[in-house]
Every structure is written in C-alpha cells, then in structure tokens.
Amino acid sequence: MRRYAITFQIRPGTEAAVRELLSGYAPPEGETPDGTRLLSTSIFMHGTTVVRVIEIDGNLPSVMAHLSRQPGIQKLERELDAHLVVPRDMSDPAGVRAFFASALMDHVTTRVAEPVRTEPVR
C-alpha cells in the first residue's frame, strides 16, 4: 500500500461550498484496468488549504489516468474549479499529471504502531 497527499488552495469565502462538494461526491470505481486499487481517500481542510490523501495498491500514474476518466470525478473537479485559487485542467490524463506534479506533497515518514501482544493466560 502506498499513500500520497496533494494540496491546493481555495478562495476565501468558499470553504462551506468546497466542504459540501468534497464530502458529497460519488466515489469512483475502485480498480483501474491494470489492477491498481484505490483503497481509500481522506480529505482535510484548514482554512483555505485542502489536503487530499489517497491510499493505493499499485501505481500512481494508473490511478491518475483512471480518475481523469471517471464521470463523477470529472463533474466534481469541474464544480471545484470555480473555488480554486489556481485553476487546473482535470479533463484528461495530461492535465491530471500536471496538477499532481504541482500539488503532490513530499512524503516524509509513515509510522505504524506495533501490534498489541496478548500473552496467554496460564
């Protein structure tokens, strides 16, 4: 599993509309033609900063191309564009790649908790 995060800025005063858009869209198909799986998506907002975290099993370019072809995602991105500080073209794989290249956050670390051990009762 790999985790990626992208960030983008929205215009001040659009926070409620963006929150509604990002919490209410239909999820995309979870598997790409090459078998890459989109495991989860989490979206965080702080003021006018939005961070979207995705977890995938497979490769990121496959997910980017797949998402650019999903009708529900295309609709969401068109509606979201009206609220962005920097508009982007998410209508085709090249536009999605350009957006990810500018918005992808550097992965610094991931820490996973050790499993809890239970000793057998004697």
Image (cartoon, grey):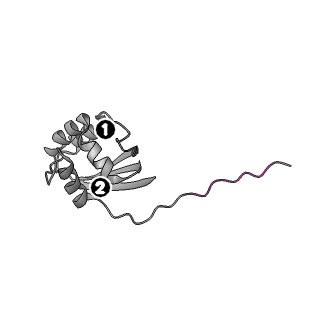
Is 113 in front, or is 56?
56
Q: Position of residue 28 (x, y in %)?
A: 32, 37
| Magenta stretch, residue numbers | 113-120
Classify mark 2: residues with Cα within 10 Å, few (<14), some (14-19) or many (20+): some
Q: Position of residue 113 (x, y in %)?
A: 57, 57
Going 22% across and 45% down the picture, which residue do you hit?
A: 15
Residue 90: which disc? none
Going 40% across and 49% down the picture, which residue do you hit?
A: 56
Task: Name the residue beneath numbered marker 2.
Answer: 6
Left or right placement of residue 110 versus residue 73 in this view:
right
Task: Name the residue beneath numbered marker 1.
Answer: 23
> In which image quadrant can residue 40 be found?
top left
Cα distance in 3D space between marks 1 and 2: 17 Å
Q: Position of residue 21 (x, y in %)?
A: 24, 38
Closer to the chain start, of discs 1 and 2, is 2
Classify mark 1: residues with Cα within 10 Å, few (<14), some (14-19) or many (20+): few
